[in-house]
Image: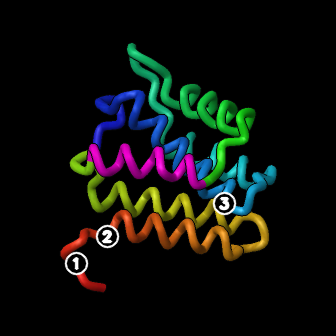
């Protein structure tokens, strides 16, 4: 997928997803912030004539932190966007997002119960309803 063709709303939604995962245990540690920055720079940093996706994602994260948005609210925002725009999310893109989410959770003392629950919700969201696991 060409990241330059994506809208601001797409990058907002990815920010909400990363925030939801990192804030699942109601705390975001420095290591998780660094991991998010690593993935944003690696996979989502796009500068084009309309907007700078990297800065947009950082500003979204700062706003979520400042407003202490709950993990549940942030995940719901991502879910709503995902459901309305499923055609944007290829299997490869979903795998890339899952890899980043798992990495964010693992960076600080492994996954805790809250993080496992939110990861399960994301896996369920990304699994087509007609597929049996």
- Kind of element beneath mark 3: loop
- Compared with 30, 56 (above or below) is above
Q: In this figure, which residue is indicated by the disc labeled 2?
A: 127
Residue at 61% in and 64% down: 103
Q: Within the magenta stretch, is there residue 80?
A: yes
The front one of 105 and 16 is 16
Q: Residues within 10 Å of mark 1 (few under 14, many from 20)?
A: few
- Kind of element beneath mark 2: loop
Q: Which is more N-terminal, label 1 or label 3? A: 3
Q: Tags 1 and 2 in contact by the CB under 8 Å rule?
A: yes
Q: Position of residue 43 (x, y in %)?
A: 48, 45
Q: Which residues are magenta?
A: 72-85
Q: CA distance from mark 3 to mark 1?
A: 27 Å
Q: CA distance from mark 1 to mark 2?
A: 7 Å
Q: Is residue 114 left or right of residue 88?
A: right
Magenta span dominant secondary structure: helix
Q: Position of residue 30 (x, y in %)?
A: 80, 50
Q: Which is more N-terminal, label 3 or label 2? A: 3
Q: Residues within 10 Å of mark 3 (few under 14, many from 20)?
A: many
Q: Quadrant of the N terminus?
A: top left
| Badge count | 3
Q: Tags 3 and 1 in contact by the CB under 8 Å rule?
A: no
Q: In this figure, which residue is indicated by the disc labeled 3?
A: 24
Residue at 77% in and 65% down: 108
Instruction: Check residue 131 in the rendering and tell me which mark sits there, or answer none.
Output: 1
């Amino acid at each position: 997928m060409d990241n330059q063709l994506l809208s601001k709303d797409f990058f907002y939604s990815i920010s909400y997803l990363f925030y939801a995962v990192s804030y699942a245990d109601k705390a975001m540690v420095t290591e998780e912030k660094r991991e998010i920055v690593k993935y944003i720079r690696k996979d989502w940093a796009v500068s084009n004539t309309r907007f700078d996706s990297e800065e947009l994602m950082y500003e979204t994260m700062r706003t979520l932190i400042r407003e202490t948005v709950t993990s549940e609210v942030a995940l719901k925002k991502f879910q709503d966007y995902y459901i309305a725009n499923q055609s944007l999310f290829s299997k490869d893109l979903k795998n890339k997002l899952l890899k980043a989410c798992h990495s964010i959770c693992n960076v600080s003392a492994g996954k805790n119960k809250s993080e496992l629950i939110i990861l399960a919700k994301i896996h369920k969201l990304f699994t087509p309803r007609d597929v049996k696991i």
